[in-house]
Amino acid sequence: MSVYQATTSAPVNIACIKYWGKRDTKLILPTNSSLSVTLDQDHLRSTTTSRADPSFKKDRLWLNGVEEEIKDGGRMATCIQEMKRLRKEVEAKDSSLPKLSGYAVHICSRNNFPTAAGLASSASGFAALVSSLAALYALPATPSELSLIARQGSGSACRSLFGGFVAWQMGFKPDGSDSLAIEVAPREHWPDIHALICVVSDDKKGTSSTSGMQRTVETSALLQHRIAHVVPARMEAITAAILARDFDAFARITMQDSNQFHAVALDTDPPIFYMNDVSRAIIALIVEYNRVSVANGGKLKAAYTYDAGPNAVIYAPKENLKEIVELIINYFPQAEPFKDPFGLFGAAGVQGKVVD
Ligand code: ADP
Ligand code: DP6
Ligand code: CO
């Protein structure tokens, strides 16, 4: 008897221009386009195995060893259903294929980093889910086509279908068929840029991204300004900066957009605080580090960005990483250094990792 099973993994992506707000909560259509970098080392990844079998009674999912309910009409159910639909199209064209679209699936996924702590587990999680089903079903779909489905699991997941520098184009059609991820530049275009992840806290966050951004859409006037007057120009400017490998411009825009995203969270009623005192102290350190460089006639040396949680991601050219890590260890002596494959050390708060 044949076994129909596939395992794939997907890394997280960390946005430089943040997605925060939906215009359609069911289809997960965003209020603005966004842009991110997909991390390419193994530190922050979801690995997912999907199996289809005629003996399975219903679709089931285990996340980090614990079974999670697949709610009817929920995001997980939608993704599985959409993937089965694509498989059905393939089966209709080739009658010799096994009818896997009619079998239930069992899915087992693991994250090698904290889940729901603001380190983008929903992004790697749904990207890994969709790509494992695509492999199981041997679908001829492109990453952009798969991104349309991953998007319906978690918006940020659509960007993890690509490596390197990735844009999620918000699209304009009500059915969402043009709200997808595209590659801005592959990782090899700018190998010099690296990401340092500073895990300030690996606790589950108090306000999920989904509920937080919905509240922002409903209550923040600042969000309306951001989506209409700020993000479109920033998307163009950061794309140009990436294509030109202009770290100064990339860093400036990344930090501005992180700041505005957290300002918009604060402008929500009731306000949402994702950063804590350690997060703010890391910002102060990077600001001072850049200030000294610029005062001495140099350029910006590092860029911080924070998702919906207190953990810092610092983008920097490789030559500055060692200095940044030393600075952080110096100012956050409680940090546990983590040795990375390049032989560098990362640290902040609880633990730190140099990745990418
Ligand atoms: P994060 O900041 O980690 O992305 P979110 O609140 O956006 O936090 O999403 C967390 C949710 O994403 C989890 O509660 C779970 O439903 C889903 N998720 C996380 N990892 C996976 C995975 N590997 N496979 C499927 N779903 C996942
Ligand atoms: C701050 O993609 O987790 O990380 O679509 O509701 O699942 P849902 O939200 P999610 O939101 C991510 C928000 C962010 C910014 C970003 O990744 O662009
Ligand atoms: Co998320």
Image: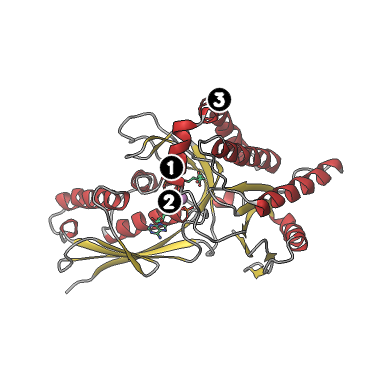
Say whether disc 1 or disc 2 marks the residue closer to the N-terminus: 2
Give how far across and how far down residue 224 sits, in percent.
50, 27
Image position of 304 (left or right of 152) = right
Give how far across and how far down residue 55 sits, in percent.
15, 69
Task: Give the numbered dot on residue 305.
Answer: none
> Disc 3 versus disc 1: distance between alpha carbons?
22 Å
> Disc 1 versus disc 2: distance between alpha carbons?
8 Å
Residue matched to label 1: 181
Please state which amino acid type lies under the numbered disc 3.
His
Give how far across and how far down residue 44 sits, in percent.
51, 61
Q: Pick whichever, 81 or 247, lies toward us.
A: 81
Is the residue marked 3 within 8 Å of ligand 2, measured from its CB?
no
Please state which amino acid type lies under the numbered disc 2.
Leu
* Mark 1 and mark 2 residues within 8 Å of each other at the beta carbon: yes
Say whether disc 3 or disc 1 marks the residue closer to the N-terminus: 1
Q: Pick whichever, 33 or 141, lies toward us.
A: 33
Mark 3 vs mark 2: in front: 3
Image position of 5 (left or right of 345) = left
Tell me where residue 133 sits by quadrant: bottom left
Looking at the rendered image, the quarter that the N terminus falls into is bottom left
Residue matched to label 2: 161
Looking at the rendered image, the quarter that the C terminus falls into is bottom right
Tell me where residue 229 sits by quadrant: top right
Q: Which residue lies at the image location 42% right of the left edge and 45% below the top edge? A: 210
The secondary element bearing badge 1 is classed as strand
Mark 3 vs mark 1: in front: 3
Residue matched to label 3: 229
Q: Quick check: 162 above or below 10?
A: above
Find the residue positioned furthest to the bottom.
Answer: 1
Q: Pick whichever, 350 or 104, lies toward us.
A: 350
Give how far across and how far down residue 177 sits, in percent.
33, 36
